[in-house]
Image (cartoon, coloured by chain):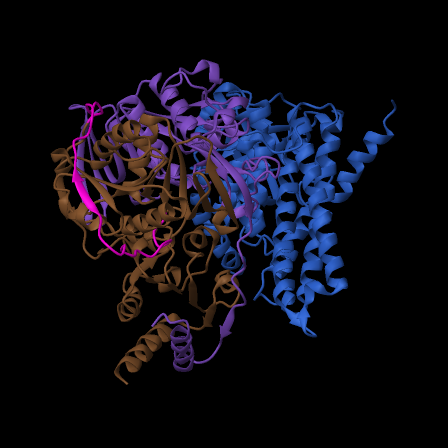
Amino acid sequence: MAGAGAIWVHGELTGDGDLANISAEVATLARTLGEAAGRDVVGIVVGADPEGAAGELARYVPRVLAITEPATADHAAGTIVGQRIAALVERDGPAVLLTGAGPEGRDLAGVVSALTGWGVLVNAVAVTWDDGPVVTMSVFGGKLTTTSRLTGDHGIVTVRPNVVTAEPAAAPGAVEAIEAPGEMTLPQVPIVDRLEAAGVAAPIEEARVIVAGGRGVGGPDGFKVVEELAAELGGAVGATRAAVDSGWIPYAQQIGQTGKIVKPALYLALGISGAIQHKVGMQTAETIVAVNRDPDAPIADFADVVVIGDLFEVAPAITAALRARKAG
Amino acid sequence: MPYRLTEDQAALRDAVRILADEQIAPRAAEIDRTAEFPWDVKDLLASHDVLSLPFPEQYGGLGGDLLTVCLAVEQISRVCATSGLILAVQELASLPLLLFGTEEQKQRWFPDLAAGRHLIAFALTEAEAGSDVAAARTRARRDDATGDWIIDGSKRFISQGSVADLVVVFAATAESDDTPRHQRLSCFVVEKDTPGFGVERIEHKMGIRGSPTAELSFSGVRVPDAHRVGEIGQGFEIAMRTLDRSRPGIAAQAVGIAQGALEVASAYARDRTQFGKPIAEFQMIGAMLADMDAQTEAARQLLYKACTEIEAGAADAGRWSAMCKLVAGDTAMRVTTDAVQVLGGYGYIDEFPVERMMRDAKITQLYEGTQQIQRLVIARALAAPR
Amino acid sequence: MRIVVLVKPVPDTASGGERLRPDDWRLDRAATTAVVNANDEYALEAALKLTEAHGGEVVLLTMAGAAAPETMRKALAMGATSGVLVSDDALGGSDMVSTTRVLAGALGAMEYDLAFAGADTSDSGGGIVPAGVAALLGLPYLSYAAKIEPDPEARTVRVNRITPTGYDVLEAPMPALVVATQALGEPRYPSLKGIMAARSKALETKALADVSVAGGDGPVGGAASTTAVLGAEAPPPRGATRVIREPADEAARQVVAFLAERRII
C-alpha cells in the first residue's frame, strides 16, 4: 500500500487517451521532491483505457496506479476522476496530491478538495519540500511572489505548465491496475457530441515559443504575418483580449488575465501594448521580444528587446532572416 | 452630505465619460467648425437615456437629482461644450414645468422630452431685457372670449431656440403700469408649429458654435390657457427659481470645459520637450498646471456642494447657485486661457482643441446671469438685514 | 428561468495598487477599489442574455467583506435583479475550502435553474471553487463553457466545453452549475437606466450564522484556513530593455542574433 505521507501525482489524459504533457512535467517535479524528501512517489491515472497513459506516467515515477473507469469515455471526466481519487487519497493518506493547473487539473482539484476537505495551493511556479510542500506562487500580475504551505498533513497542489521540464527517470516504474473503493454518487454529465475547432493543436500553455498579435495587427488577415513567424519558430500563435473580442482569432489562443497564463521560453509580441491585463499572462516568459510602433507602450518597460517599427515590416523581415539562417 | 460620490453617482459619471470620450469627442472639432447643431449627438444622448436624467420616473425619466444631472453635463462638456449644453438646456427649460407645472402639463410634455424625442428651450432674454429680466416687452394679451393668450414680441439669444419643439416663453401680462415690476410677467409654453412663431436669425458666435442661438419672433401666437405655467404674474418668480436650480448646470459645463483643457495641457506638457526635457518639468509651466488643477477642483467641489444644498431645499439656494456659477465660469476662462498659454503657438491653432475650449468658456461668464448678476445675488444675501 | 451568478469583488488590476497586509499576508482589500472579477462579468453577461431570451431573473451570490455592496451594485447595474451577500468578520482570510463550503451552503438555500461561475479570479484564484461547490451540492458540473443552451421546457442544459481540440458538448438536467468563459461574449456596459435602477434593487446580506455551511460541521473562515502564506517578495527584475530603432531588415538581423545568443533558435 502506498506509504502515508507519500507524494501522489495525477496523470491527466488527453482526448486521445495519451498522457497530457503537463502531467509529465508535474510527475518529474513529484519525483524530484520525493527524492529530496525521502517520500514515496505514486502516480494515479483514471480513464476508460488507462494502460497507455499509465505506462507513459511510469516513465517518470516508480509506481503508477491505474483505474479503469469506462464512464470517462463519454462523460465529463473531472467529477468521475475526482471521486475515484478522493476515495483513494482518503484511504491511503498521501501528504500531497499534485495536479496540473490547467482546466482538467483544476476541475479535479476542486472535486477532491470538496470531498476530502483538503486544502489546495494553486498555480505553483515552484515547489520545494519542508515536511510538506512549500509552494511559490506569482500574484498581482507578477508584482509579487508568495510562498505558502498547507496547515494540515494533507493537501493538493496545482502546478502551472512550463514550470518544470519533463525528464524521465533512469528506469521506468511499475503500473498496478487497481479497483477504486466506494461508490460514486455525484451526477455524471454525458458528452453527447464532440466538435472539432480548426487551428488549435496543443494547448498554448505548453508551447515553448509563442508569437502573439494584438490590436496593432488590425484584423484577421493581419494575423498571417503572426502565423508565418510562429511557424518559422516552431511556435504557437497567441493573441490579446482585444484581438479575440474583435473576432480576429479564437479565444483558445488568448493570453492574459481572462485567457491563458503562459511561461514560454520565448514570447514574441507583435502590436501589443502590454497593458496589465495582458502582461499578467506572459510576463514570466524567459525571453520577451516586442515589436511596436509606440516607444511609450508599457511593453517597452519589461520586454528584453523592443523593436520600434511597423510589425508588418519587421515580422516578415524576422521570418525571412530566420529562413536565411536555416538555409545558409 | 457624504463627502464622496455614492457608488451609483460614480458609476453614472464613469458611464457618461466613456460615452463622451468614445463617441462625442471625435465630433467636437467638426461641430465647432461647421457650427451645425449635432443631431447625431442629441440622438446618441437620447438613446443612452442621458436626456431623461432630469425627468421624474413616472414620465419615463430616470429621476436623477441635480448633482447627477450636473455630473453628466460635466463629463460631456469635457469633450464638447456644445454637446454638454444639450442636456443643460433640456434641464433648464423643463424646470418651470418641473417646479410649477400642473400634472396635466407634465403628462402632456414630459414623456417626449424624457425620451429625447423633443427638445425644449427657455425664452426669457430680449434685446432690451438681458440682466433686467423684468423689463421684458414681449406681451401676452388675454382673449376673454376663449381664455386663450395671444403673444406678441421677440426674444433674443435663446439657446437651441431654432431646434426646440417646445419653447418656454416669459411675457408681460400686467394689465396696468402700476403693477409692481416683479409681477408683470407670466410664463407660457409654445409648441413650435404654432402659427405666428418664427425663428428670425441664428447668431454667429465666438464659442459653443454648434448650439444654435436664435432670435424668436411671436406674431399673434395663440396659446390656450392650459399652456400657462403657474399663476398670472408669477413669471418673474418662476424665472428666478428656475435659474437658481439651473445655474449649476452651467457651472458643470464650465467645470467640464476647464477639466478638458487641463487634460489637454497636461498631456501636451508631458510630451513636448524643449531644452532637453518635457516642458512639464519647468517650474513656470508646472506652476500654471498646478493652479489650473487646484482651481478646477475647487470649482468642482463648490458645484457638487451647491447641488447637494439646492437639492436638499436649503433656504439660501440662490446664494449657492450664484456662487458655483460665478466661480466655475471664471475658473473656466482662466484655465482655458492658461491652457492655450501652455501650448504656446500650438494653443492658438485648431490643431489642438484648447483654442476652441477658450472660446467656449467665455459664454459661461455671460449666460444664465452674467457674473455681475451672480455677484449681486451673493452681495444682496450678505447685505440683507439679519 | 432563474440563474444565480457567483460573483467575486477583486482588486482592480488596472489600478496597480494590490498589496498584501504585512502582518498576516492577507490580501489588503482596502488598498484599491474593488471591481467585479472579469471572468464573473462574462458569466453574468451570459446569464443576462439567457434571461432576456427566455424570461426570468438573474440573482447574484457573493461571499465578501464589508465593502462588497458597492461592487455588487455595479453588477446589478448591468441588469441582475437582486443579490445575496454573505459577509462576516470571521470569513476574512478564508481559504478556498471555506469559500467553497460557505458558497455551497448559501446556494443550497436558494432556488435556481442554473448557477454560473467565472473560470477563475484575478486575485490569485485557482479556478477550483466552482467544481467544489457543485460536488458539495451534488449538482451536475459543466465547466469551461463556450456556449450555453438551456431548454427550459425540458429542464435540461447543453454546454460546449472547451477542449484542446475543440468542444465536448455536454448535457445535464437542471439545476446544474456551469463555469463560464470569455468565449461566451463581451459583457455589456451598464446603461444609465441600469445604474439608476440599481439603487433600488434588493441586496440581502447574510452573516455566517445565517448560512447552513456545507461539507460537515468543521469551522470555516480565516481561523480555519488549510493554507498559510509564509512570506512574499518582489521577483527579481528582468533587466534593462534593449531598444532597436533600425529599419526592418537590420532590426530583424539583430533580433535573430539575439535569439541565437539566448539559444532559443
Looking at the image, residue A85 sits to the left or right of residue A286; the answer is: left
Q: Quadrant of residue C115?
A: top left
Looking at the image, residue B45 sits to the left or right of residue B123; the answer is: left
Looking at the rendering, the stretch of residues picked out in magenta corresponds to A160-187
Percent coordinates x, y for residue B157 in the rendering: 62, 46
Residue A171 forms part of the magenta stretch: yes
In this structure image, what is the colour of chain A?
A: brown
Percent coordinates x, y for residue A309 in the rendering: 44, 73
Quadrant occupied by the N terminus of chain A: top left
Tell me if residue B183 can be seen. yes
Looking at the image, residue B374 sits to the left or right of residue A113; the answer is: right
Looking at the image, residue C29 sits to the left or right of residue A211; the answer is: right
Residue C9 forms part of the magenta stretch: no
Residue B115 vertical placement versus B342 (above, below): above
Q: Which secondary structure class fits the magenta region best? A: loop
Q: Quadrant of residue C252?
A: bottom left
Quadrant occupied by the C terminus of chain A: bottom left
Q: How many marks?
A: 0
Q: Quadrant of residue B180?
A: top right
Residue B99 vertical placement versus A136 (above, below): above
**Residue at 69% from the left image edge and 63% from the top image edge:** B280
Percent coordinates x, y for residue B215 in the rendering: 58, 46
Chain corresponding to blue in the figure: B
**Residue at 74% from the left image edge and 43% from the top image edge:** B327
Chain corresponding to purple in the figure: C
Residue C28 vertical placement versus B227 (above, below): below
- The foreground one among A258 and A202 is A202
Tell me if residue B220 can be seen. no
- The foreground one among A31 and C252 is A31
Residue A4 vertical placement versus B146 (above, below): below
